[in-house]
Amino acid sequence: MKVYKLIILGILLFATIPFAKGQSEIPIQNISTDNNAIYRLFSTQNIYTFIKLNTRNGKMWQVQWSMESKYRGEVILSDESCVYDKEDEMNGRFFLYPTSNIYQFILLDQIDGRTWQVQWSTDKDERGLFKLFDDDIVKMIANMRKGLLDEEDMNIEMDEQGYSLNGRSLGSGGLVQPKYKVDDEGTVVVNITVNPKGRVISAEIGRGTNTDNTTLRESAIEASRNTKFNPIKTADNQQGSITYKFNLN
């Protein structure tokens, strides 16, 4: 009878293991409560991998431990400072929040509320930091606060300039702005194709464009080709568009 009960218990335990592994649970963070810490370690759902964050400027490293020396070490996740001026750095400014996706975190600037999508991976081409905000507007607001700009100088039309790509987010460089030196205005819509690594592999003028100016059209296409998006784990390319609004200054 005892053997029978033991077998039944073993079957029940075995049956619950796959169910537990299939849950999308946000990992519990064991984080120091010291707000003055320059560096913090954040655990991932991979038991061997952590993310080291510089809380002053948002720089990050992927840290891996192992019983085998060849698998130990640190690799750069993002070596780009997330503050515009070094004088704005401060301990505890940046913080990481885990998501239910094993590879994704959200980086938060606790001073001005900016956010980034953070992706770690064993594949170096899939690691990165991707902005979830409009960089130009944030910079202008920061300059306004410092008295460097008036509200009249903020010549940005958010409803008319942007991109559409089936939920994909922009890469660390943001939406690349066209470079042009002609006195003309108009709207240029560029149809783009983006590969899984986030690179624009084709760009052409699309419907909605209302200018024949060759310079504006070519500068919009060039800016589109230089724009990068977040990498995704799929074998298919995606189609979308970027809209540029040119205004006379």
Image (cartoon, grey):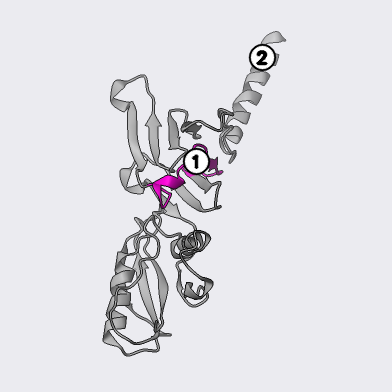
SS label for mark 1: loop
Q: Which residues are magenta?
A: 81-104
* Image side of residue 112 versus residue 171, left or right: right
Residue bearing mark 1:
102
The magenta stretch spans residue 7? no
The magenta stretch spans residue 95? yes
In depth, the one of 141 and 95 nearer the eye is: 141
User: Which numbered disc, 1 or 2, marks the residue closer to the eye?
Assistant: 1
In depth, the one of 106 and 146 nearer the eye is: 146
Which image quadrant: the N terminus? top right
First along the sequence among labels 1 and 2: 2
Residue bearing mark 2:
6
Q: Residue at x 34, y 64 (%)?
A: 227
Mark-to-mark CA distance, 1 and 2: 35 Å
SS label for mark 2: helix
Quarter assignment of residue 57 = top left
Q: Residue at x 60, y 33 (%)?
A: 20
User: For the image shown, how many numbered marks are present on the structure?
Assistant: 2
In depth, the one of 159 and 102 nearer the eye is: 159
Q: Amino acid at mark 1?
A: Ile
In depth, the one of 68 and 85 nearer the eye is: 85
Quarter assignment of residue 48 = top left
